[in-house]
Image (cartoon, rainbow, N blue to C red):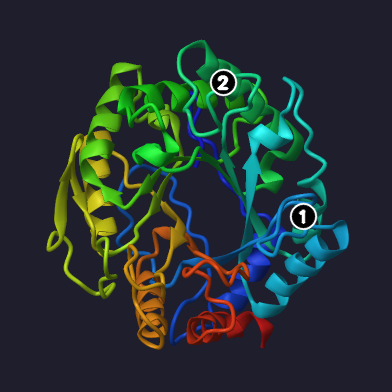
Amino acid sequence: MRVTGRHRAVHPTPRVVWWSAALVLILTLVAVVVTVRHDGTEDTTASPAATGVFLSVVPVGGDLPDGRRQTAQSAMEAVEAAADQGAAGIQVTADLRWLCTTPECDTTPLEPLVERAGQLGLAVNLHVNSTPAWMDGRGRWFGPEGADARRWADLFAQLVARFGTDVSGYEVWNEPNHQPFWQQGPDPAAYADLLKAVWEAVDEVEPDAQIIGGVLSNNDLGFMSRLSAALAERGGNAENRFFYDQLGVHPYAGDESRGYDPGRSAGSADVQTPTGTKDMTFRGIQRLRAQVAEDEGIWRDVVVGEFGYSTTPGTFYFVPEPRRAEYLAEALRLVAGWEWITVFTVYTTLADPDDGFSIVGTESEGALREAMTGRRD
């Protein structure tokens, strides 16, 4: 829940109530309900089963894995397919390098998806990332710092001004703790500046918009600890929720050559990075959330914006089929009992034969579909 100076009551929209009621019927793998807490304490009385499965959809005009461009028709077909399969929502990448070629952003590639999703009762998460070339010519993954952080936040706020609460959550950047996506080198203080700038810019146009912060690669305890401290130094507190609403994380489980069973114990596969400890297990997400609660005094809802395994040998998180399907099913069973995870997005449900993470046409796709059958039925 967004808080700006006082607690605001949060009332579920009709579409959220509709898909929540339908997907609570999924008993074997995952039920879909969104739980919203109205204070900063752990909700120990809520019944289990509260994770929505989201499917990725490419914006109109965006590049598809097969080299084609997404048309308005194919985008509508993708959204409708997500509804037919029983998804709770769709995740759409809002690439500001492409949408904001000038300081005035063009939201038309996103509008048909948000509109159609709303008509079908699907929630929408926007994964907002990338730096426009006019802001930084070094490349899209150089994180905006200093005055650029405020300029980037103004672009972000344009999306919020257009879509408001029709979008259920807005993610701030992609894996700022991972060097390929913050190419000048991960910097918790710089990301804290960006998160605060986004919060303040969004607050001026739609205080009830849900801001998803962190968006971490793996359960990065060290980076998150430093981020919480940096946000506190910038005035973050329980009243302003440390400048974000929900915690985003990509809790990939494994190392450079294999993926780990999602049931593996938290803390059993820690690695050290320049910012501290990173828990490479899936269950480490519980540990990360508990640390945030200790550091910030808020038990966060969590958005899993990416999770999956690759079937390409010799790569990070390698797991062959059909074991990958078994691991994915186990992950879904686990999150079904964690009512504080509101979104679970498998990477990737896009058809790309060159990407070992793609589950299209595999046993893993069958496992995911089984988890979503409750809505279709």
| Distance between mark 1 and mark 2 Cα atoms | 29 Å
Q: Position of residue 55 (x, y in %)?
A: 60, 65
Give the residue displayed 54% in from the left and 29% down from the top. Answer: 139
| Res 253 quadrant in image | bottom left
Q: Which amino acid type is shown beneath numbered disc 2? A: Asp
Identify the residue position indicated by label 1 in the image. 113
User: Which residue occupies the extreme top position in the image?
Assistant: 147
Q: Position of residue 56 (x, y in %)?
A: 62, 61
Mark toward the start of the polypeptide (1 vs 2): 1
Q: Is residue 180 left or right of residue 171?
A: left
Q: Which amino acid type is shown beneath numbered disc 1? A: Leu
Q: Position of residue 334 (x, y in %)?
A: 34, 74
Query: Is 50 located above or below residue 204 in the figure?
Result: below
Give the residue displayed 68% in from the left and 71% down from the top. Answer: 82
Of residues 224 and 17, the one nearer the viewer is 224
Q: Is residue 74 left or right of residue 306?
A: right
Give the residue displayed 43% in from the left and 72% down from the top. Answer: 49
Element carrying mark 1: helix
Identify the residue position indicated by label 2 in the image. 136
